Image (spheres, rainbow, N blue to C red):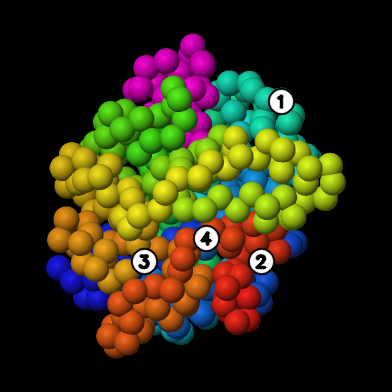
Amino acid sequence: MRVFESAALGPLTLRNRVIKAATFEGRTPEALVTDDLIEFHRTVAAGGVGMTTVAYCACSPEGRTDRHQMWMRPEAVPGLTRLTDAIHAEGAAVSAQIGHAGPVANSVSNRATALAPSWQISPLSLRLTRTATVSDITRIVADHARAARIAADSGFDAVELHFGHNYFVSSFLSPALNRRSDGFGGSLVNRARVARAVADAVRAEVGTDLAVIAKLNMDDGVPGGFWLDESLAVAQWLESDGSLDAIELTAGSSLKNPMYLFRGDAPLREFAASFPQPQRAGIRMVGSKFLRAYPYREAYLLDSARQFRDAVRMPLILLGGISNRSTMDLAMAEGFEFVAMARALLREPDLINSMQKEDRSTSLCIHCNRCMPTIYSGTRCVLTPSGSLG
């Protein structure tokens, strides 16, 4: 199994096994597709990936992390269709990352109270979240299915359900965030009900029209949070439910420990510069407790991901430190059907074409993570000559 061979992903066939991972693009100021967003993904598609992932397509207005993010509604369909057409013209497939931000939502920006399995003070907005009612849960499950139908009608080939990073579904999985005593809290079976319901509802809505992927946390990187042993069980349940075509394995908490996913330098100074005072001073003083630095190494999630490869038979997507051809080959040798990469493609959108031509086997990305604060002004590599992707 070679990384540049075509591969089946549910009902579709990708031209190769490389997926552009979802990264906030920062290119939807009116919560709708822009020409800039289309060019961002068209450039990556032209650069050779098998599929690119559009992030973040919220399933409802309050499910956005902030009010500028796109949410799936009829008004978005014309722009989404232009986007999928542009990517298909370059020979790549396209996936929509669908989810609800839950406690990660900025209630100040959204002008709507953030929802969580249990109330807490959000470290992002410094506002109280609201405990989701059973009615809220039912509505949000249905919103995921509705958003997936909009994706299908807009020409997407796949949807990626966001079950990671302590967003809504992930927060229910986390013992640290879910203190409920009803049927959605307590035991892992109860805490996993939202994830399984979302996957089932989306599959029932789209059938075989789309590939359905879940982005699942292997662990939160937070004391008392969701951990490997529980995640393995959830992955096995999702596999047995039969609603998914693949799982993309991830880690970390956008709410409490985002650098656990990214690894490498923590761009504290750059993040602070992205905010006005007094937030800027506050980030400089206490930001290191939120943006903790973790050493970077290639395939840094592989050790954990191997345990999932042994536990389930369904296709798995390896994420985290995929920058070099040798790492991709290792992932294939370890039995992973696909690899997902992001930062390396911000630095070099045409990296996959270069690797296929054997002009390049190693990314120029140095994992400085200075691309991360650019989500507020258009996600890009700050080291490229143009300072932008696309």
Mark 1 = which residue?
128
Please name the residue shown 58% across and 42% down the image. 291
Amino acid at the residue labelled 1: Leu
Q: Which mark is residue 378?
A: 2
Question: Tag on residue 2?
Answer: none
Residue 382 on the magenta segment: no
Residue type at mark 2 is Gly
Query: Which disc number belongs to residue 323?
Result: 3
Q: Quick check: 175 above or below 50?
A: above
Q: Nearer the viewer, mark 2 or mark 1?
A: 2
In the current view of this chain or complex, which residue is farthest to the right?
A: 277
* Residue 333 location, quadrant: bottom left
Asked whether residue 173 is drawn in magenta, I would say yes
Magenta part of the protein: which range? Answer: 165-193
CA–CA distance in space, label 4 to label 1: 33 Å
Q: Residue at x 29, y 38 (%)?
A: 235
Nearest-to-viewer mark from 2 and 4:
4
